[in-house]
Image (tube, rainbow, N blue to C red):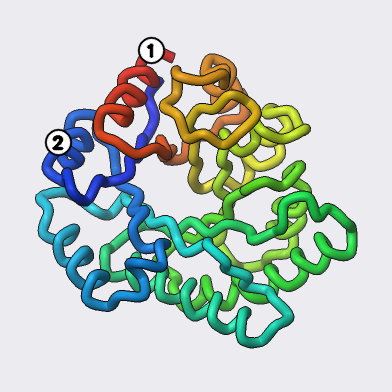
Amino acid sequence: MERQWEIIPQFIRLEESVRLSKQYGASFEYNDFYKPSIYQDEEEIRKRIEVYKSLDRDRSKDTLHGVFFDIAMISTDDVIRDRSRYLMKQSMDIARELGCKGVVFHTGILAGLWTKPYLSGWVTAASEYLPVLARQYPEIEIYIENTFERDPSPLIDFMERLTDCPNIKLCLDYAHASLTVTDNEEWVKRMAPYLGHMHTNDNDLIADLHQAPGRGSIDYQEFKRLLDKYDVHTSVLLELDGIEEQEFALKFMQTV
């Protein structure tokens, strides 16, 4: 299956990550900087940025996973909201310095809270804030990822609210979608016009296990069929750790 794959660089095994990325033409999605243990340590941030910039590779197709632990960008609590937005800007600043093409953020929608007032409030507040962030970083795409929403409706409503925000797109996490009550085709069909990026891995269709594709229960022939049917040509992160598992996944996806 021909696709612009991405892998997560393994900081303690970077030579092997670079080798794998060159062998399969895969880009990187940096998963370091969403971790509080790293983003609260300015020295560690600087060290990792400099190491990544020193590697002999093109970073222009790389992406970065933005902060998501405890992030509530539309909180009505001023302290929580302001801290969340500060950290989101920090993610964007790091991506800018690394020369990444885009940053992934979760919606922050609480799983299981599926009332109309809550969801419409999220759509309204997110569609007011995220364009402000996007305009501050016009050269970087912002990808809003489905996490554990029941269906894609809030994300579609959000995108339909946007005007003149070409650098805000959606990130379909296919593995997350496979855990919902909504059929995967519905997720792909509705999100396809707005997609800029994707995540995938495998699971048992019960829990978000982050297994290598081919080791779980997701039908990857169906995955290929849906991407072809709805003309999806975005980059796709194989979202799992470990050089060996990443290589297994890259080889597996060539057979799909």
Look at mark 1 in the image and give the residue it sits on.
255
- Residue 254, can we see it? yes
Q: Considering only vertical position in the picture, is 231 above or below 146?
A: above
Q: Secondary structure at mark 2?
A: helix
204 and 192: which is toward the camera: 204
Look at mark 2 in the image and give the residue it sits on.
19
Q: Give residue 169's quadrant in the image.
A: bottom right
Q: Count the numbered circles shown.
A: 2
Q: Is the residue marked by circle 2 packed among few (<14), some (14-19), or many (20+) residues within 10 Å? A: few
Q: Is the residue marked by circle 1 packed among few (<14), some (14-19), or many (20+) residues within 10 Å? A: few
Q: CA distance from mark 1 to mark 2?
A: 21 Å
Q: Considering only vertical position in the picture, is 192 above or below 90?
A: above
Residue at left offset 16%, top offset 41%: 18
Residue situated furthest bottom in the rendering = 78
- Residue 188, can we see it? no
Does label 1 or label 2 sit earlier along the sequence?
A: 2
**Residue 7 at x, y = what percent?**
33, 40
Query: Looking at the picture, which amino acid does disc 2 mark?
Result: Arg
Task: Answer whether labels 1 and 2 touch (C-beta < 8 Å).
Answer: no
Image quadrant occupied by the N terminus: top left
Residue at left offset 29%, top offset 36%: 242
Q: Is residue 91 left or right of residue 8?
A: right
Q: Is residue 58 left or right of residue 169?
A: left
Q: Is residue 87 left or right of residue 152?
A: left
101 and 82: which is toward the camera: 82
Image quadrant occupied by the C terminus: top left
**Residue 211 at x, y = what percent?**
45, 29
Q: Secondary structure at mark 1?
A: helix
Query: Looking at the picture, which amino acid does disc 1 mark?
Result: Thr
**Residue 118 at x, y = what percent?**
83, 64
Q: Give residue 50's quadrant in the image.
A: bottom left
